[in-house]
């Protein structure tokens, strides 16, 4: 018998305000069109946080839902890991703010900065904490308010992102530890700082300057995305002796429909087995995978026993994949 981290509950939160492409263009005076954005990215809508709404507010809402679905009380949570590029403040960590908001008092809480790969990094860290017996009940949360770090005069980036939060509750379970047993099978994390400048935030706490806004060389990011994501998914499958045919669901980071389609083709998966939310949410960075998981779990697509592949790439560059049996 081995200790496995099982996904016991999922949750999500989207701000009330939803903007279509046309509404966004009109509101911010951007020279773009609904047709351009849909064709190049697949995005139709995004949610935008209310002025007073923070990453910890949204993360706490998603966490409460994950706890409720798992039937777990906040008092049982040993660790809270928050992936965010848009924390409430440099410290206290957004994770600690969420700890207070959900009424958890034991254990520890900290933030992780791995941009859009943050949730997969969070799964990797939580998996290690659970396998080594350091925690039995771990919340992994991705929560982002990118609307506050976008340059609303840069049409190459401001149309791509949205706000939101997603969460999973992981619980320790002793089982046979085979690929047929439930839980996280493995997580595979990578970074390469040589590509730090192709997707970064210019400025922020501790920097020597810059307005604190997101900058991106879109074409270069695109080029890295498909090759690195395909490689890391194959690495994850290979580490478990599995093949493309074993995948039931692909839950990819929701950056761009063209990247998602390319991944589906590389993995020989029909589009019905790829969970897509980028059309409705745009790119919510670290929140995108848990939001997509939550949707597909709640509407019954992801069933008990299904093998799910999650993959993401983001600023750093960072990228990674996780395999989970539900
Ligand atoms: N509306 C209309 N035109 C736009 C536009 C917009 N919102 N944004 C850019 N353009 C224009 C450019 O100015 C350019 O015009 P030009 O030819 O007159 O110079 C033209 O469209 C092509 O721009 P380009 O940047 O080459 O487009 P692209 O085909 O590479 O698509 C992205 C741009 C951003 C959609 C694409 O590069 C992409 O998706 N990259 C990956 C981004 C990503 O996923 N990042 C997050 C990873 S976590």
Image (cartoon, rainbow, N blue to C red):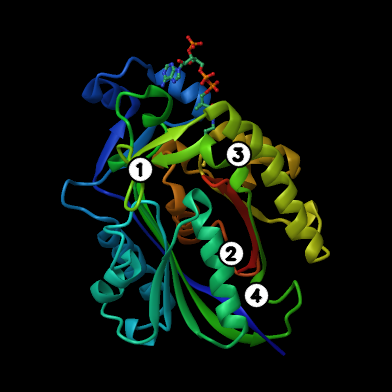
Label 4 neighbour load within 10 Å: few <14, some 14-19, many 20+: many
Name the residue carrying label 2: 303
Q: Which numbered mark, 3 or 4, is in the foreground of this view? A: 3
Picture disc at residue 116: none
The answer to whether the residue bearing label 4 lies less than 8 angstroms from the nearest atom of ligand 1 is no
Q: Earlier in the sequence, mark 3 or mark 4?
A: 4
Q: Quadrant of the C terminus?
A: bottom right
Q: Quadrant of the N terminus?
A: bottom right
Q: Earlier in the sequence, mark 4 or mark 2?
A: 4
Determine whether the residue tagged by mark 3 lies in a helix, strand or loop: helix
Evaluate whether residue 309 shows in this view.
no
Q: Which numbered mark, 4 or 1, is in the foreground of this view? A: 1
Determine whether the residue tagged by mark 4 lies in a helix, strand or loop: loop
Label 1 neighbour load within 10 Å: few <14, some 14-19, many 20+: some
Where residue 139 appears, x then y in whole percent? 43, 73
Name the residue carrying label 1: 203
């Amino acid at each position: 018998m081995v200790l496995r981290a099982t996904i016991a509950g999922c949750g999500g939160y989207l701000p009330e305000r939803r903007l279509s492409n046309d509404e966004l263009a009109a509101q911010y005076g951007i020279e773009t069109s609904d047709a351009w954005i849909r064709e190049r990215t697949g995005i139709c809508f995004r949610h935008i946080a209310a002025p007073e709404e923070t990453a910890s507010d949204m993360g706490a809402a998603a966490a409460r839902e994950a706890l409720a679905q798992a039937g777990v009380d906040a008092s049982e949570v040993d660790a809270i890991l928050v992936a965010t590029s848009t924390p409430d403040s440099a410290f206290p960590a957004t994770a600690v703010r969420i700890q207070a908001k959900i009424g958890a008092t034991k254990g520890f809480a900290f933030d992780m900065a791995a941009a859009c790969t943050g949730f997969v990094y969070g799964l990797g860290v939580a998996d290690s904490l659970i396998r080594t017996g350091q925690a039995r009940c771990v919340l992994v949360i991705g929560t982002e308010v990118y609307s506050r770090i976008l340059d609303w005069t840069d049409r190459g980036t401001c149309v791509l992102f949205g706000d939101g939060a997603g969460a999973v509750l992981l619980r320790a379970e002793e089982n046979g530890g085979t690929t047929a047993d439930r839980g996280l099978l493995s997580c595979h994390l990578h970074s390469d700082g040589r590509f730090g400048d192709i997707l970064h935030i210019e400025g922020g706490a501790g920097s020597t300057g810059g307005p604190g806004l997101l900058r991106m060389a879109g074409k270069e990011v695109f080029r890295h995305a498909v090759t690195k994501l395909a490689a890391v998914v194959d690495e994850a499958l290979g580490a478990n002796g599995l093949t493309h045919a074993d995948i039931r669901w692909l839950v990819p980071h929701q950056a761009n429909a063209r990247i998602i389609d390319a991944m589906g083709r590389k993995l020989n998966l029909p589009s019905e087995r790829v969970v897509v939310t980028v059309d409705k949410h745009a790119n919510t960075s670290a929140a995108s995978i848990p939001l997509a998981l939550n949707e597909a779990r709640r509407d019954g697509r992801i069933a008990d026993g299904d093998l799910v592949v999650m993959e993401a790439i983001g600023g750093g560059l960072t990228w990674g994949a996780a395999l989970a049996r539900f």
